Image (tube, grey):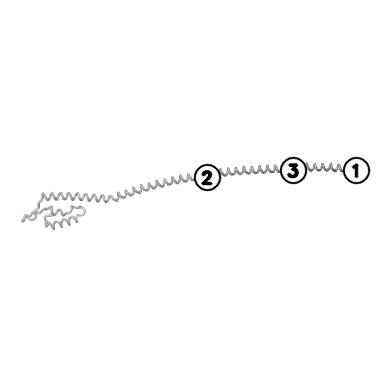
Amino acid sequence: MNLRLLEKKERIEAEERKELRQQERQEKREALQKKERQEAEALEKKERREEQEREKRERQEAEAIEKKKRQEAIERQERQEALERTERRDEEEAEETANKIKMELQERKIRENRAIEESKPTLEIEKLEKEDREKAREHEINLRRLDLNLLVVIDPVQNDRFRLSAPIKFVPPFDDVDTTQFLNAFEKTMSIHDFSAEKWT
């Protein structure tokens, strides 16, 4: 009786140990599977993180390249616009200089024409003065001829000779425009030289 109970007890204990070992093995398998899952999840998570970081870097690099391209395009556009502004400014300055030179030439021509117009009266006066000098010279020559060849008798009784050229030298040349001055000078000269009015003609 005791033997059977002992055997039964041993069988029960053996089964319990067996179940315990199986349970331990199951727990170990589950723990190992859990660990493997965790490691796989961690690895997958790491790979996803690395992939995200790689995509982020690639995206940032692409954005940086695109930004650099846009910046370079803006700088090229600004340089082109600056060059065009410089060319326009140079053209405007060249046109302004040409217009300034043209205006200066026109003003110089106007001044020259004005000077010519203003000098015309002076030239006319010089011409008239030259003509007057020519007339005076001709008049002097004529007086010298008269002085050499013409004798006029003032008083037949006294038979005094009157040199006509002497008073005539004091008479200005005849002027058609101002006859009054000529006649006054003639009359005054004849009176000074006692040349009677009857002999004036």
Looking at the figure, which quarter contains the N terminus?
top right
Q: Position of residue 131 (x, y in %)?
A: 21, 49
| Image location of residue 59, percent across then percent down | 62, 43
Question: In front: 142, or 38?
Answer: 38
Residue 174 in the image: state x and y as whole percent. Answer: 18, 52
Which disc, if any, is residue 51? none
In this rendering, position of residue 12 left or right of residue 55: right
Is 152 on the left or on the right of 118, as rendered? left
On the image, numbered disc 1 is attached to which residue?
A: 6
Tell me the kind of residue under disc 1: Leu
For label 3, the residue is 35
CA gap, disc 3 and disc 2: 58 Å
Q: Which residue is mark 2?
A: 75
CB atoms of marks 2 and 1 within 8 Å: no
Q: Residue at x 90, y 43 (%)?
A: 6
Q: Amino acid at mark 2?
A: Glu
Q: Amino acid at mark 3?
A: Lys
Q: For marks 2 and 1, give the one nearer the viewer.
A: 1
Q: Nearer the viewer, residue 72 or 57?
A: 57
